[in-house]
Amino acid sequence: MQLTLDSINIGYPQKHEDLVVCEGIQFSANAGDLVGVIGSNGIGKSTFLRTLAGLQPPLKGAVSLDGKNIAVLSPKDLSRQISVVLTDPIATKNLTVRELISLGRQPYTNWLGTLSKDDLIKINQVLSMLQLEDIQNRICYELSDGQLQRVMIGRALAQDTPVIILDEPTMHLDLVHKVQLLKLLGSIASELQKLIVFSTHEINLAIQLCSHLLVMTKNDTRFGSPDALIKNDSLQQLFPQKEVYFDPKSKSFTFEATS
């Protein structure tokens, strides 16, 4: 399975002139990859993910899955190929953890929404994988922001799509849980052969834990492995301000402490 973008432009159509957020994006990722999308605030990471997920069309070019433009897929077929968790609040928090995760099985259930034996097995696997078994019967409004974030990721995993797209999945988590979650996503991508693409402000963690990165700047976007992006100075261009700089030796961003 391969997800490909060939020089696409992303943004929003306008009456007189389209609002282009970013242009010329080259991207090609495969099953088993964990891809981090990094860049400064307002650079277009969420717009990119929405375009990648088929929630809004590119202004130019196409998003292709195994060579097929996702724009031609029906909503049901697309929901069996790509699952997505955005930062938008969920419609209701009155469901239990298990019920919310079960919604991920909707693309596969009958018109009554009846869960099959296979559906229940998949839901139980997700609960175990994300260590949510102990809270599976709790109402979602009782959860912390971090717990709810894991449940939303669980819903995407229960959807069992080859592509999973996550907008800021480590939001609301402390450092330890950020590391644990990103390591878990890497294991899921590798062991279950999923392509997981996520945006993050945890750039140092992404450099260490992702197989590939999409670096978004005002001037261009660059895609590749962390080592390749370090070698061609792409990461050094991410924050051109003097306050923050990239150290190739430690493979991390740092800053000079004030005296």
Image (cartoon, rainbow, N blue to C red):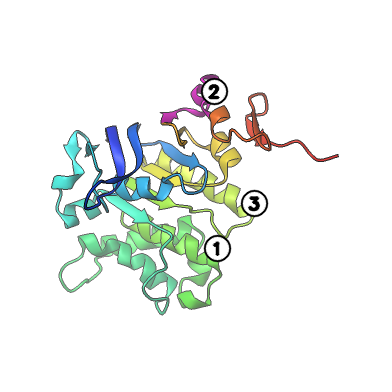
Q: Could you tell me if the residues under marks 2 and 3 are in contact, i.e. CB atoms within 8 Å? A: no
Quadrant of res 158: bottom left
In the image, what residue occupies the spot 51% across and 26% down? 234
Dot placed on the residue nearer the N-terminal end, 2 or 1: 1
In the image, what residue occupies the spot 28% across and 62% down? 105
In the image, what residue occupies the spot 39% across and 77% down? 95
Closest to the observer: 223 or 209? 223
The residue carrying mark 2 is 233
- Which image quarter is the C terminus in? top right
- Which image quarter is the N terminus in? top left
CA separation, marks 2 and 3? 27 Å
Residue 146 circle label = 1
| Circle 2 Cα neighbour tier, 10 Å, few/some/many (<14 / 14–19 / ≥20) | few
In the image, what residue occupies the spot 54% across and 34% down? 238
Type of residue at label 1?
Gly
Is residue 119 at all visible to an observer of this figure?
Answer: yes
The residue carrying mark 3 is 175
Dot placed on the residue nearer the N-terminal end, 1 or 3: 1
Q: Which residues are magenta?
A: 221-234
